[in-house]
Amino acid sequence: MKTFNVYKHPTRGVEAVKVGFSWPAFFFGVIWMLFKKLWTFAGIWLGIYVVLAFIEAAAENAEAGGSQAMVYLILVAVYFALWLIPAFKGNKWREENLSNRGYVLVNTVQAETPDAAIALVARQA
């Protein structure tokens, strides 16, 4: 069983957000952010990827040596962080986004899927 926070909006309906690690964010990153309407985070991530691409291109043109190796090591660490952060923080970002868009936390429930969590909250109401 997973824990879900269920949010309700007067006109837009109900959304269930799993508490904790987000596997879809882990695998799909920016695409997941766009799908979940996390526009600001998606823009930041895309911007960081563009900057990293420029840094990588500049490092390729630089003279091979210790500084080039250090740049590549830092790039790998940053890419790894950009891959992991949405997985660990994504659902929390989604909850904050829903709250900012007028959704209200209705209940926290244990369920297997988001749809089951929504159905459980609807039965309790």
Image (cartoon, helix red, strand yellow):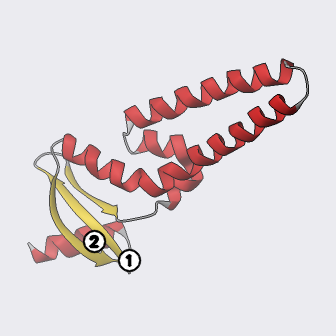
Query: Which structural element holds mark 2?
Result: helix
Residue 99: percent from the left, percent from the top? Answer: 20, 47
Sequence-first disc among 1 and 2:
1
Q: Are marks 1 and 2 in contact (CB under 8 Å)?
A: no
Residue 112, numbered label = 1
Q: Residues within 10 Å of mark 2 (few under 14, many from 20)?
A: many
Residue 108: percent from the left, percent from the top? Answer: 22, 70
Query: How many numbered markers are drawn?
Result: 2
Rendering quarter of residue 111:
bottom left
The quadrant the C terminus occupies is: bottom left
Rendering quarter of residue 52:
top right
In the displayed structure, 102 sits above or below 106; it is above
Query: Which structural element holds mark 1?
Result: loop
* Residue displayed at 10% across by 48% down: 10
Residue 23: percent from the left, percent from the top? Answer: 52, 61
Q: Nearer the viewer, residue 27 or 35?
A: 27
Residue at mark 2: 117
Residue 96: percent from the left, percent from the top? Answer: 27, 47
Q: Is residue 18 left or right of residue 55?
A: left
Q: Nearer the viewer, residue 66 or 25?
A: 66
